[in-house]
Image (cartoon, rainbow, N blue to C red):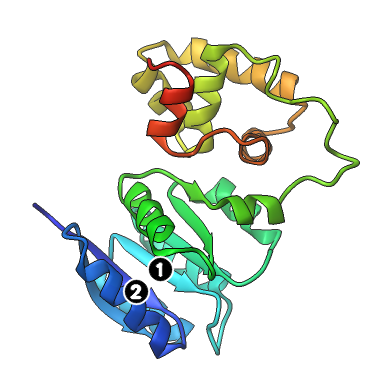
Amino acid sequence: MRKNSVILADKSRLFTDAIRSILKEEREFDIVSDVSCGIEAIRMAQLLRPDILVIGQILPDITMFRVVREVYRELKNTKFMFIVHDENSELLRFLSEIQTLGVIRYNSDIKEFVTAIRLIAKGERYISKEVIEDLRLTPKEMPEEDLLADITPREREVLYWLAHGQNNKEIASTMILSEKTIKNHITHLLKKLDASNRTRAAAIAWSEGLPLIPEEFFFHSGGR
């Protein structure tokens, strides 16, 4: 079985050693490098072309967002995982640019980290509940009623795949529907959610508690 190559970036040796120890127990991952600064993260990513780049928020020289911009410009297939200390509204902007992205908090447990990186390796997104809360829409923007109450089961599934970064063609293939049908569903979703774009719709889905893990989503939806 081919392993997913991983580069770790954080100035804390304790952090990178801990992540290395965790991933040693997971057969599908291979840490090819760990670095302590952003410039080195960019250099090693361009050299080794990893499947996944795990970025801690503590980089002494440049921001993690600059690292992502530089790496993503050249390596469109590299997946990114942020492990952040505090809320940062810029994350939503990156969700619209990067198809495969994970964000968890520094205080997340090992189980959540492993769940997140496995989903990212499959090409999905994972945003922790704590980060969702940090990025939650303000009370003025959020109506009191359940925003997902009026969407149909089929629209809910479209929203699920949309929130995981799939484009219309990918959603159509997954759900065995035409792209035109998916486009119509998304148009209805944006109207019902009062969302201006797909990223906004994804943010609402996460903040309203739409399950992020496939097993949970399809269990609560009664299967496909």
Picture residue at 56% right of the left edge, 83% below the top: 62
Q: Residue 145's image quarter? A: top right
Question: Is any part of residue 11 visible from this angle?
Answer: yes
Residue 58 picture location, percent across and down: 55, 82
Can you give x and y, in whole percent of width and height, for residue 31 in the image?
24, 72
Residue 45 visible to an observer of this rendering? no
Asked whether, in this view, residue 84 is left or right of residue 87, the answer is left
Of 145 and 29, the residue lying toward us: 145
The residue singled out by tag 2 in the image is 19
Disc 2 or 1, which lies upstream in sequence? 2
Q: Is residue 171 above or below residue 199?
A: above
Label 2 vs label 1, nearer the camera: 2
Q: Report, in whole angstroms, how far the alpha carbon at label 2 lies from the one at label 1.
A: 9 Å
Image marks 2 and 1: residues in contact by CB distance under 8 Å:
yes
Q: Nearer the viewer, residue 15 or 53?
A: 15
- Residue neighbourhood size for the residue with mark 1, other residues' Cα within 10 Å, grouped as few (<14), some (14–19), many (≥20): many
Q: Look at mark 1 in the image and give the residue it sits on.
A: 54
- Compared to residue 146, the image places residue 90 above or below, namely below
Residue depicted at x 33% and y 62%: 52
Given the image, on which type of amino acid does mark 2 rest?
Ile
